[in-house]
Image (tube, rainbow, N blue to C red):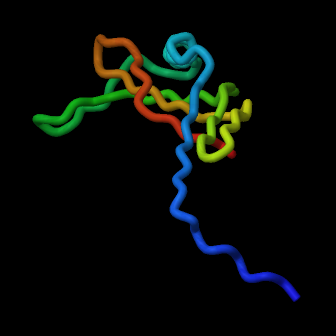
Amino acid sequence: MRKPPQKNDGSKMMIGTNVEDPALLQLLVETLAECKPGFTNSYKKVQRGWRSIKTSTIQTRVSGNISFSSKRNKKISYATCFVFTCTKEMKKKYDLTWSSSLS
């Protein structure tokens, strides 16, 4: 017969995630967005008060570590794929806007 799960003892766990060299990663993603073939240089006309933007989505691998701190501290390395989306306004450079993990 199985024992019932133990009740929470009130201890807390903190989880933190670090990306290896985030500034280099951002530079890489924004540079790749500029180089992506197939873009025309024209922006669509939009209604007054709105801004026309271009988007570029790049998939790349990201590595870093995840830290768990509780009664026993643990650090685990990871490497996984992320999708990064950059946006660009007229006459400006691409800026990293959001990202999503693919795992």
Instruction: Pick whichever, 51 or 96, lies toward us.
Output: 96
Residue 94 horizontal/vertical position (percent): 41, 18
Q: Is residue 99 above or below residue 11?
A: above
Instruction: Pick whichever, 44 or 91, lies toward us.
Output: 91
Q: Is residue 72 left or right of residue 90?
A: right
Instruction: Pick whichever, 26 or 20, lies toward us.
Output: 20
Q: Residue furthest right?
A: 1
Instruction: Pick whichever, 8 or 97, lies toward us.
Output: 8
User: Looking at the image, which residue is at 57% across and 27% down?
Assistant: 18
Q: Is residue 70 above or below residue 46?
A: below
Residue 44 horizontal/vertical position (percent): 31, 31
Residue 89 horizontal/vertical position (percent): 30, 21
Q: Is residue 22 left or right of residue 42?
A: right
User: Looking at the image, which residue is at 62% across and 35% down?
Assistant: 67
Q: Give the quadrant of residue 24.
A: top right
Please identify the quadrant where the N terminus is shown: bottom right
User: Looking at the image, which residue is at 62% across and 19% down?
Assistant: 20
